Image: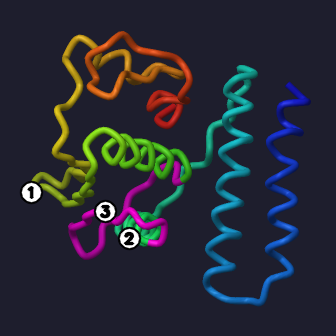
């Protein structure tokens, strides 16, 4: 496990050092933030695999800002997503875990349906509704419980037997 950790963290450290040499600016700051998130995700994933996962602290965040940042990141990567919602909604959550779950859902929508729209609103009862919508065929009901298991990936259609490989929605939500 130590070798895997080293192999994953070394390129991240090298990239960070190279980026530190770049001129200050918003693009550089965005790249450094992305590397910090990547390093945290690698750490959490390795902890999960070792069986000693540590829960990320729960903090108050702006969901609106989180989703807006994600939308900007996808636009920068050349795959814009739709996004609409309330002007400002906050909640207590584990920000990296939520961001990972949303990213997994958006990536899955883009991969399997070719589009993704994030919708955020507060219902009349005060509940927060956060949805990732697409125009794909969806997942067959028989597979719905399995998509939350770590390392499970369904086929392109969502109908074949699940395969291993991805960290899955389960790890993102865990």
Q: Is residue 22 left or right of residue 57?
A: right
Residue projecting furthest to the left: 124
Q: Secondary structure at mark 2?
A: helix
User: Residue 147 location in percent, x, y?
Assistant: 38, 22
Q: Is residue 60 above or below residue 21?
A: above
Does 36 lie within the magenta span?
no
Which residue is pictured at 52% across the width and 49% down the height?
94
Q: Is residue 153 above or below residue 54?
A: above
Q: Earlier in the sequence, mark 1 or mark 2?
A: 2
Give the residue number, with chain letter if any, for mark 2.
68
User: Residue 122 location in percent, x, y?
Assistant: 18, 59
Give the residue number, with chain letter if any, for mark 3.
81
Does 86 lie within the magenta span?
yes
Crowd tier of the residue under label 3, counting other residues whose Cα lies within 10 Å: few below 14, some 14–19, many 20 or above: many
Mark seen at residue 124? 1
Q: Is residue 102 above or below residue 108?
A: below
Depth-wise, is mark 3 or mark 1 nearer the camera? 3
Crowd tier of the residue under label 2, counting other residues whose Cα lies within 10 Å: few below 14, some 14–19, many 20 or above: some
Crowd tier of the residue under label 1, counting other residues whose Cα lies within 10 Å: few below 14, some 14–19, many 20 or above: few
Q: CA separation, marks 3 and 1?
A: 26 Å
Depth-wise, is mark 3 or mark 2 nearer the camera? 3
Q: Nearer the viewer, residue 110 or 53?
A: 110
Which residue is pictured at 38% across the width and 62% down the height?
79
Q: CA separation, marks 1 and 2?
A: 23 Å
- Region of the chain picked out in magenta, as a range: 76-95
């Amino acid at each position: 496990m130590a070798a895997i950790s080293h192999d994953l963290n070394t390129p991240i450290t090298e990239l960070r050092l190279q980026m530190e040499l770049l001129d200050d600016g918003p693009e550089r700051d965005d790249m450094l933030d992305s590397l910090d998130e990547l390093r945290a995700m690698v750490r959490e994933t390795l902890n999960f695999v070792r069986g000693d996962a540590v829960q990320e602290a729960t903090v108050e965040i702006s969901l609106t800002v989180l989703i807006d940042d994600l939308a900007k990141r996808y636009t920068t990567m050349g795959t814009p997503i739709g996004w609409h919602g309330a002007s400002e909604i906050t909640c207590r959550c584990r920000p990296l875990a939520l961001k990972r779950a949303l990213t997994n859902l958006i990536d899955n929508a883009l991969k399997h349906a070719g589009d993704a729209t994030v919708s955020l609103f507060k219902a009349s009862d005060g509940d927060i509704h956060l949805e990732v919508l697409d125009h794909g065929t969806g997942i067959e009901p028989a597979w719905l419980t399995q998509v939350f298991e770590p390392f499970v990936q369904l086929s392109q259609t969502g109908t074949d037997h699940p395969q291993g490989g991805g960290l899955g929605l389960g790890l993102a939500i865990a």
